[in-house]
Image (tube, rainbow, N blue to C red):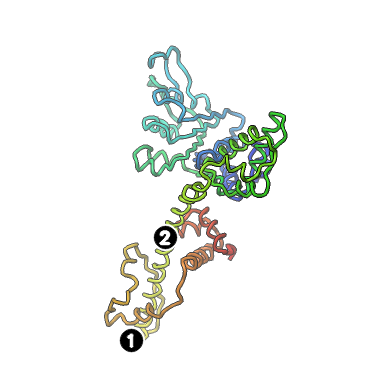
Amino acid sequence: MTDLTSVKQRFGIIGNSELLDRALEVALRVAPTDLSVLVTGESGVGKEFFPQVIHAYSARKHNKYIAVNCGAIPEGTIDSELFGHEKGSFTGATDSRKGYFEEADGGTIFLDEVAELPLSTQVRLLRILQTGEFMRVGSAKVQKTNVRVVAATNNNLMQSITAGKFREDLYYRLNTVPITVPALRERPEDIYLLFRKFASDVAVQYRMPAITLDADARSMLEHYGWRGNIRQLKNVAEQISAVEESRVITAAILAKYLPDQQQTSSPSVMGAARMEDMNTERELLYKVLFDMRNDINDLKRMMTEMRMGMSPTAVPTTEHTHHDVIGLLPTKTQSAPADDYVESEVVDDQPRELTKADVQREQIIRALRRHNGRRKDAAAELFMSERTLYRKIKELGIDDKL
């Protein structure tokens, strides 16, 4: 396995965050293959480095690497840019021209902002991914190309699919291997490192002393929301370096360059994380209820068999849908049927009241034990992303090597 430190040095990637390292490890593992890769993440997180890493460590590294910003090309000319055109195929086409897919034959093409592609262009792209075939604009001749496609977007493609703006079949073709680049607020240990690098670059370029932050300013920097991610952080470092006379930056000075400080650190920063937590907690509660239902039914059957003089036998686990949750736990006003008195005894036994954190912790521990500590498998069972599981393990103080 290639050393991550050497990769970071080669491409100027700064940071020691575990989430960043994990994304780079995926890029390096998939690089020797020809599988399509979809890089996702918020605007300004540095998604453009990952296709470069994938190309540089692939068998195609000696061939062309072409990066295309799909959002910067007008809809009327995007097909011509990507697939080429024949002379006279449209007004202004005075000569035949190769497209990017033809130019990159044998190499790698990076489609940035792939969600901005028109639907008609998405059909052409899907054909290349499936068969390697394409036609120039204005031509009936089918041509072949051997190109590895890496795409990137900061959009939620599943929402775009629902809205009819992105083809679902193309999504699954592009998303053969997904790589999620963490937002800057998810790697706070890297914020000061990045700021110091940007400040140093400005100082060298303009031959001035580099700015430094006092303790309060550094704390403010690391706890800010950074909606613009690394791009915004670089902009702030450059502004302060150029404008401020003092080379030691206090919290009061830094605050002038951080817009909406109070608002940024609450709804904007935490909104997405809170929504994800709510979804995760709901799914965990469903799972708790399913487990309780199984346990109660098993106990009821065992007690019934014992009353009838039968030896208790193992009862196979029954799968349940979300509809089974309705009416599962009787309230004090409900009266249980006479033949269901065993289930009522079990439910009304007044167990210790569990907090939401207790429920989450128990379910995560069970899943990790069932899968011998494999986070990916445990996360799939718990209906959450591996990143969310990692965060929950840290928040709840769980030893994931159980």
Q: Is residue 95 above or below residue 163?
A: above
Ranked by sequence position, the earlier of labels 1 and 2 is 2
> What residue is shown at x 48% (from left), y 20% (from top)?
98
Nearer to us in this view, 122 or 190:
190
Q: Residues within 10 Å of mark 1 (few under 14, many from 20)?
A: few
Q: Judge the density around disc 2: few (<14), some (14-19), many (≥20) Cα neighbours within 10 Å.
A: some
Q: Inspect the image, locate mark 1, and give the three-letter code of the amino acid beneath it.
A: Met
Residue marked by disc 1: 308
Question: Residue lying farthest top?
Answer: 94
Name the disc covering residue 237, or none.
Answer: none
Amino acid type assigned to the residue bearing label 2 in the image: Glu
Q: Which residue is depicted at the point 38% across and 19% down? A: 138
Left or right of residue 10, residue 275 in this image? left
Please indicate, yes or no, whether residue 50 appears anywhere in the rendered image: no
Q: Decide: is 291 above or below 236.
A: below
Provide the secondary structure element on which disc 1 rests.
loop
In this view, the residue in front, 148 or 402, is 402
Q: Quadrant of the C terminus?
A: bottom right
Give the image location of residue 263, x and y in percent: 49, 47
Q: SS class of the residue under badge 2?
A: helix
Residue 341 x %, y %: 32, 82
What number is the disc on residue 283? 2
Residue at horizontal 57%, vertical 39%?
257
Q: Is residue 133 left or right of residue 23?
A: left
